[in-house]
Structures are given as structure tokens and as C-alpha cells.
Image (cartoon, helix red, strand yellow):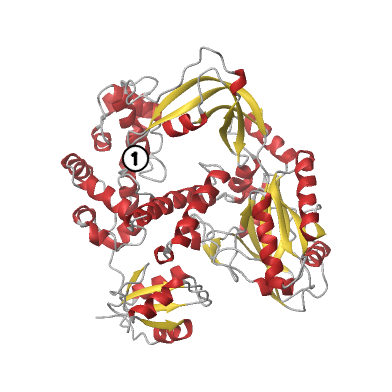
């Protein structure tokens, strides 16, 4: 694979994974299945293993979740809340067990087996037995302060049941809603005409992250505690299983199905039994978690950048049923991409009735050979997203014909305009309240709107002329359009719908270049120096801003009054790092790689992701990989973390 190819694929994968991370961890609206997400992550990990010099500090493989929402105050965890590595088949689990045995120099490891609840991770901080703070996982380093909401959850004790509580005890657990509670919640929502929830996981996440604690209090939230994070006080029990019993003793709920298992055969049997029993439980699980039971052995095994080496989540395969494909429709995206969608005879899968499943593209259709009239096996991948697993070929009609994705569809240009404007007006972009797809389609069909700039030229008379839009609603929509003109540069850039430019990338571009004019004029080489911008993103940016029509649209938006506060250049500190090209490699103990990168940027350094002859300095943490070797071979200066911290401390204050 030529050097340019891994760069391009890595950048594309990183952008896509970050988008999915944001939807899962921040919006609680996953758009792909766990299986599809794992596939993307595994592909990225494999490429980065093959090309270690391409591993960047901000790669999703170096992160745990996604950045916390700005709706809640940030909370820095006392210890990182790591995610778990996944096993999706026996081979991967056996590999995990083999590595543990080799590292611990034993033939058989004792594990604690626990059900993997499908909810939202939470950190509970008790000081001398009193609950003082609760936070979501966030990105693993910083979460969201949801203390006021957690105070309303009856199953979480505000004071621990012990006469001599630890000085500090941070509990890790999973917030969830039982199946019984979920059914009751949706019944109550439907009774008042409110939106019902797709599944208990989304309901739990949405309920915990309400801005009004009274709403959280009205929801049937539960918790299962599974471990201790930070601890100050008398010694903890020596094993994970005894820690669980300790938590239960002081009043913290734990999962009842936890047990000790000796060796890999016992693990596989526990996994099999829980797979058979999962539908009988009153809460959703999507797998089981195995943790090395002895806490000293856990410490010996340690961790990688984002997950412990002493635990693994062994996922269940999703439930499968059969149904029939009644039609294959073609949807048009905002970039003009055509996506085939299979329409299905309604079928009940995993607690939800599904009626369609995306077929992604022509390659996917050809690989699975899905045709109208076929009997197909479907499942909710990751227990969430409907997907067609395979066709039952023996039930296929003799006169069936292959489906070929057309090059164009009727009203394709219209549909593309509609989707582009839907994106522009969406909550995370320009946030035009009340401007939905149906109104946008009417505006486009009437010839009133062709691109986003046309929205701000609409008159009250034109809106009132639309179907089912009364004068008051039209006035409200015009007010919403006026309010949307006050935005931020990053939201505006994201709203433009530039291919491959997601929210994180738009934010990085805004912080680095600080004006839309500068972004539009910046050349490829300069764009590539910006965090989160790789060759694919840089090329998309240049292609967008090199088109006169796009430049005209941007100018019209600005002329119509769209504006944002100026972004001041970050004050750089006088430092020995000024103007140096620095590469970070390995795990740092004193801070995250992103925090280290920020410290360097504030001191005038340019932080790169790979070592070359142009690199001035390499900062090496634990397990640095090949970058340190390459630096030595090239004669580039290498310093360890202790020296790095000392150099940071030599900062003399803001540069004049």
C-alpha cells in the first residue's frame, strides 16, 4: 500500500468513527450498529499497527469515548474511565485468556463474570460516605456533571451504609432502565402524546441527561455498580468479586448474576448460559464481562491507551428472524449519494418492530444479492440498527431479478437540495427551530429555495402560501430564521455540508484559522497541519471553496446577516518549545496526549503525528512503539515524560 493510501484511509476512518462516537456518547443517537462500529475501529487499528508512524494523539484508537456535551459542566475524573476491549467470537476471547495466562505465568486464570448491561456509564463520588458528585464517562478523562439528576434516582444511596466510610470512594456503574420500567415509560409517554423511546438504552441516556432534574426523577432509572475507581481509606478487598460484595454491603446495587469462574472453559459456559437466559432477564444485556478476579493480578496486567488488559466484554450475536423484502427504494443524501433501502414486511425483533433496513450501496447489494420478493434473515445489529444478514435463496422466486442501483432517480437534484438544507437547518448546525423536511421540500418544489442562502430571503407571504402553514407558524419560522443568524464559525462551517467535514473537524478548522475567508483561501499543505484534517478532508475543503457557486452562497449568507463572534488567537506562552515541531508517542502518566498537545500548542509548538527529518523533538511516554526508534535513527532529540514536565514548567508567561 503506497504511503498516500494509508493516510487517506486512516483519515476517512478517523472522521467516520468520531462522528459515530459523537452520536453515541453525546447525542445518545447511534446511527450504526455496534458490529459496524467495531468493524471500522478494527480496520483502523489494523492499519495503525501496520503503519505505526501514522498513529496520531487524537486518533479514536487512543480515545475512550467522545467529548462531553457543553450542556453540562465538565468534570475531570480522578482516574480515567476506560472502555473495554470487545470479543465477538470464541477465538478473540481465547486470545485474551491466552495473553492473560502468559503475562501472569499461569495455566488458568480465575475471573469474575458479570452481565454487560446496555446503559450509560456513571461515576459516583462519595466523600466520607456522602454522595457529592456524579459524572458521565464523556471522553474517559472528562465527563458531564449530572449530580443534580443522579440525586433524584432512588436506587442510588445519598449516604453509604457503613459506620466508618472511606475518605474518598469513587464508584463505577451503569445507569439503565429495566424492561418493565421501559414499557411503563413508553405507555406514559404515548398517553400524553409525547415521543416514545426506541429502546431502554436510549431512554436511560436521555433521562439521565435532562436539563430539568424533575424529568429525570419521573423516569424509572436503575443502577448496577461494577467497580471502584479512585479510593482513599482502609484497604479494599483483594478480589473483584469481594469488591462487588463490599459494594452491596454498603448499600450500592450490583448485578445479581455475577459469579466467580475458574479458567476459560467455565467462562465459555457462563457466556452460553447467559446467552440462553438473556431474554428472561428484566433488563437488556448485550454480552458478558470477564475480569481477572485478583486485583494484584489486574495491576500486573495493566492497561493500553483506552482499555484494561485484565477485562474483556464478550458480545452476544444479535437475534435473527426472517421476513420478506417488499421493495427497494433509493434515497438521496445531501451530497447526492444514492442509498438503497430495503422495505420489509413488518417483523418484531428484539422488542422493536422493524420495517426497513439500509443496503448501503451497490457493492453491499451485490455481495448479499438482495432482491425484491426475497425472504431474508434480519437482525438488529448491536440490538439497535436493523440489517439484512443474508437471503434465504432456496425460497427465492424463479422469476426474481437482480436489483441494480440507478445512476439517477426522479427528483434527484430536488432531493439533494432538500437534504442539504435539512442538514443546514439541523439542531447541531444552524439550529432553525421548526424548519423540518416537509416544509423544506415544499419550499424547494415551489422554487423558493435552492440553497441555504435562499432561506434568509423568504417572506411571510411566501410562507403563508405553503400547505398547512398558518400565519402564526410562518411568523414563528421567520423569527427562528432570524435567531439562527447568531451562530459560531464552527457551526456555520459544519452547516455548509462540506463532504467529510464533521463537527469536530469544523471546530478544529475554526480554532486554527479563525475566519471563513482564511479557511476558503488556505492551501492543502497548510490545511494538513491542522489537527483532525487529513488529505481527504483537506481535498474536500479545497474542492468546495474552489467553486464560485459555493463562494457566492457563503457571501450571500454573510450579507443576509449570518454572523459569529470573532475568535481570538490563543495566547502563546514564552517557552523553549516555541516554533519546534514536536511528536508525542507512548502513554503519558501525568496527562492525556490531547492535554499534552494543547500545552505544546499554547507554547508555540507545532505538534505532528509522525516522525520525519523535519521533526525537532519527540516526547516519549510508556510503550512508545517505533516512533522513538525512528527518531533515534534520524538523530532527532528524544526526551522522556519527566523532562517534558520540567520543560513545560519553564514557561515564562504570555509572549508579547
Residue nearest the viewer, comparing 629 with 152 = 629
Please give left or right for residue 69 compared with residue 597 in the image.
right
Instruction: Mark yes or no: residue 74 visible.
Output: yes
Image quadrant in which you'd find residue 292: bottom right
Residue 87 percent coordinates (x, y): 64, 53
Q: Around disc 1, counting alpha carbons within 10 Å, would you say few (fewer than 14), some (14 to 19), or many (20 or more)?
A: many
Question: Which residue lies most toward the top here?
Answer: 399
Image quadrant in which the N terminus is located: bottom left
Name the element at disc 1: helix
Q: Nearer the viewer, residue 246 or 398?
A: 398
Q: Could you say where residue 278 lies in the image, as x and y percent from the top left?
A: 76, 42
Residue 529 falls in image quadrant: bottom left
| Residue drawn at 67 percent across, 36 percent down | 319
Q: Can you identify the residue that label 1 sits on?
A: 424
Above or below for 149 versus 346: below
Please give left or right for residue 630 compared with residue 287 in the image. Answer: left
Q: Position of residue 378 (x, y in %)?
A: 60, 30
Residue 198 shows up from this direction: no
Q: Nearer the viewer, residue 637 or 402?
A: 402
Amino acid at each position: 500500500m503506497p504511503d498516500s493510501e494509508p493516510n487517506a484511509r486512516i483519515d476517512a476512518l478517523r472522521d467516520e468513527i468520531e462522528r459515530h462516537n459523537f452520536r453515541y456518547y453525546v447525542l445518545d443517537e447511534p446511527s450504526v450498529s455496534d458490529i459496524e462500529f467495531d468493524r471500522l475501529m478494527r480496520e483502523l487499528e489494523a492499519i495503525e499497527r501496520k503503519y505505526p508512524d501514522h498513529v496520531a494523539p487524537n486518533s479514536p484508537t487512543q480515545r475512550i469515548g467522545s467529548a462531553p456535551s457543553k450542556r453540562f459542566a465538565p468534570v475531570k475524573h480522578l482516574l480515567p474511565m476506560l472502555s473495554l476491549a470487545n470479543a465477538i467470537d470464541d477465538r478473540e476471547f481465547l486470545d485474551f485468556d491466552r495473553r492473560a495466562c502468559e503475562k501472569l505465568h499461569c495455566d488458568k486464570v480465575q475471573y469474575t463474570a458479570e452481565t454487560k448491561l446496555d446503559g450509560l456509564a456513571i461515576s459516583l463520588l462519595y466523600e466520607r460516605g456522602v454522595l457529592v458528585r456524579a459524572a458521565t464517562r464523556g471522553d474517559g478523562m472528562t465527563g458531564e456533571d449530572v449530580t443534580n439528576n443522579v440525586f433524584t434516582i432512588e436506587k442510588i444511596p445519598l449516604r453509604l451504609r457503613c459506620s466508618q466510610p472511606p475518605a474518598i470512594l469513587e464508584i463505577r456503574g451503569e445507569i439503565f432502565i429495566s424492561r418493565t420500567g421501559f414499557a411503563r415509560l413508553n405507555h406514559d409517554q404515548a398517553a400524553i402524546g409525547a415521543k416514545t423511546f426506541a429502546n431502554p438504552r436510549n431512554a436511560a441516556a436521555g433521562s439521565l441527561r435532562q436539563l430539568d432534574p424533575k424529568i429525570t426523577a419521573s423516569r424509572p432509572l436503575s443502577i448496577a455498580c461494577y467497580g471502584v475507581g479512585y479510593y482513599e481509606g482502609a484497604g479494599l478487598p483483594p478480589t473483584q468479586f469481594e469488591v462487588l460484595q463490599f459494594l452491596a454491603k454498603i448499600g450500592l446495587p450490583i448485578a445479581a448474576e455475577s459469579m466467580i469462574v475458574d479458567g476459560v472453559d467455565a467462562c465459555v459456559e457462563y457466556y452460553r448460559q447467559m446467552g440462553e437466559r438473556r431474554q428472561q432477564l428484566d433488563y437488556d444485556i448485550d454480552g458478558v464481562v470477564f475480569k481477572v478476579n485478583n486485583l494484584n493480578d489486574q495491576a500486573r496486567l495493566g492497561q493500553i491507551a483506552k482499555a484494561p488488559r485484565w477485562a474483556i466484554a464478550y458480545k452476544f450475536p444479535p437475534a435473527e428472524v426472517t421476513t420478506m423484502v417488499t421493495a427497494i427504494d433509493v434515497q438521496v443524501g445531501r451530497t447526492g449519494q444514492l442509498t438503497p433501502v430495503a422495505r420489509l414486511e413488518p417483523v418484531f425483533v428484539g422488542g422493536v418492530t422493524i420495517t426497513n433496513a439500509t443496503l448501503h450501496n451497490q457493492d453491499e447489494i451485490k455481495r448479499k444479492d438482495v432482491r425484491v420478493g426475497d425472504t431474508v434473515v434480519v437482525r438488529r445489529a448491536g440490538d439497535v440498527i436493523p440489517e439484512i444478514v443474508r437471503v434465504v435463496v432456496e425460497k427465492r422466486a424463479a422469476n426474481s431479478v437482480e436489483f441494480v442501483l440507478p445512476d439517477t432517480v426522479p427528483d434527484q437534484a430536488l432531493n439533494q437540495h432538500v437534504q442539504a438544507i435539512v442538514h443546514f437547518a439541523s439542531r447541531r448546525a444552524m439550529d432553525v427551530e421548526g424548519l423540518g423536511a416537509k416544509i423544506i421540500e415544499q419550499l424547494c418544489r415551489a422554487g423558493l429555495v435552492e440553497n441555504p442562502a435562499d432561506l434568509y430571503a423568504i417572506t411571510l407571504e411566501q410562507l403563508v402560501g405553503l400547505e398547512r402553514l398558518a400565519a402564526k407558524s410562518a411568523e414563528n419560522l421567520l423569527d427562528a430564521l432570524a435567531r439562527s443568524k447568531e451562530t459560531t464559525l464552527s457551526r456555520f462551517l459544519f452547516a455548509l455540508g462540506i463532504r467529510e467535514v464533521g463537527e469536530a473537524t469544523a471546530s478544529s478548522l475554526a480554532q486554527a484559522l479563525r475566519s471563513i475567508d482564511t479557511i476558503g483561501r488556505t492551501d492543502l499543505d497548510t490545511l494538513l497541519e491542522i489537527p483532525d484534517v487529513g488529505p481527504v478532508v483537506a481535498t474536500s475543503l479545497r474542492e468546495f471553496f474552489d467553486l464560485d457557486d459555493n463562494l457566492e452562497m457563503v457571501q450571500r449568507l454573510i450579507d443576509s446577516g449570518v454572523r459569529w463572534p470573532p475568535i481570538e488567537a490563543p495566547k502563546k506562552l514564552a517557552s523553549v518549545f516555541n516554533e519546534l515541531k514536536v511528536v508525542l508517542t507512548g502513554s503519558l502518566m501525568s496527562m492525556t496526549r490531547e492535554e499534552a498537545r494543547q500545552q505544546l500548542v499554547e507554547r508555540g509548538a507545532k505538534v505532528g503525528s509522525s516522525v520525519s527529518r523535519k521533526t525537532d523533538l519527540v516526547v516519549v511516554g510508556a510503550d512508545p512503539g517505533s516512533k522513538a526508534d525512528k527518531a533515534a535513527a534520524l538523530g532527532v532529540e528524544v526526551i522522556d515524560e519527566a523532562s517534558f514536565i520540567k520543560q513545560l514548567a519553564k514557561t515564562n508567561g504570555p509572549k508579547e
